Image (cartoon, helix red, strand yellow):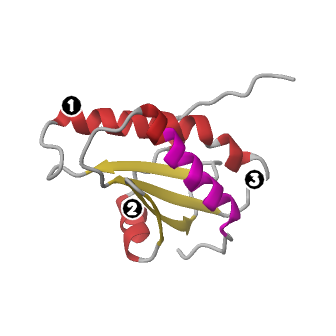
Amino acid sequence: MGRQRNTFGKGERLKSVIVFDRAFSEGSKLKAFPLLVRYTNSSFDEKVPYQVATTVSKRRFKRAVDRNRIKRLLREAWRLEKHRLLIDWTPGDPQRAIVFIYVGSTIPTFEQCQSNIRKIVSVLIDAPITKPTK
């Protein structure tokens, strides 16, 4: 059995402001404290099932190093768990935009981030995917 590549490339990062805003206005919400997740169906030029963004409030964490640390932890936890979502996906299937919002007040450990991302991925696996609105 070959090793699976767990990468988080440029095409998997959510950069479109329009799609980002639509995830907040029309998207569904998941909670796994201290994470809040907004996701919506979308379509991308990239051949990936999900595009992901992470946010941390400047109001809760004044120092940029703290915000960046939390975002790095969330992205790493996502990178290691996303393979579960790729199992049944083929190019041409519906795609989703996901925004991870950290709402806690302390810097989490990697294990906490991974546990929360694991819960969210389990819910996303079971959530039905509908056709995206353009």
Of the image marks 3 and 2, the number of the one nearer the N terminus: 2
Q: Give the number of the disc on residue 35.
A: none
On residue 89, which mark appears? 3
Closer mark to the observer between disc 1 and disc 3: 1
- Dot 2 lies on which element? helix
Instruction: For the N terminus, give its image quadrant.
Output: top right
What residue does disc 1 label?
A: 65
Q: State the image coordinates of residue 76 (x, y, percent, origin top left).
A: 48, 33
Q: Are marks 1 and 3 in contact (CB under 8 Å)?
A: no
Relative to 29, residue 8 above or below: above
Estimate how packed mark 2 is, as few (under 14), some (14 to 19) or many (20 or more) residues with alpha carbons within 10 Å: many
Of residues 123 and 100, the one drawn nearer to the viewer in this rendering? 123
Q: Is residue 10 visible?
A: no
Q: Which residue in the rendered view is the most extreme toward the top?
A: 2
In this image, 121 relative to 74: left or right? right
Residue 105 magenta-highlighted:
no
Q: Identify the residue at horizontal 53%, vertical 34% (top origin).
A: 9
**Which residues are drawn in magenta?**
114-127
Q: Percent x, y for residue 108? A: 35, 38
Q: Nearer the viewer, mark 2 or mark 1?
A: 1
Mark 2 → mark 1, Cα distance in angstroms: 23 Å
In this rendering, position of residue 73 left or right of residue 118 = left
Using the rendered image of the protein, determine whether residue 6 is visible from the camera's viewpoint.
Answer: yes
Q: From mark 1 to mark 3, how far is it between C-alphas?
A: 36 Å
Residue at 58% in and 63% down:
43
Q: Along the polypeptide, which appears first: circle 1 or circle 3?
A: 1
Circle 2 sits on which residue? 20
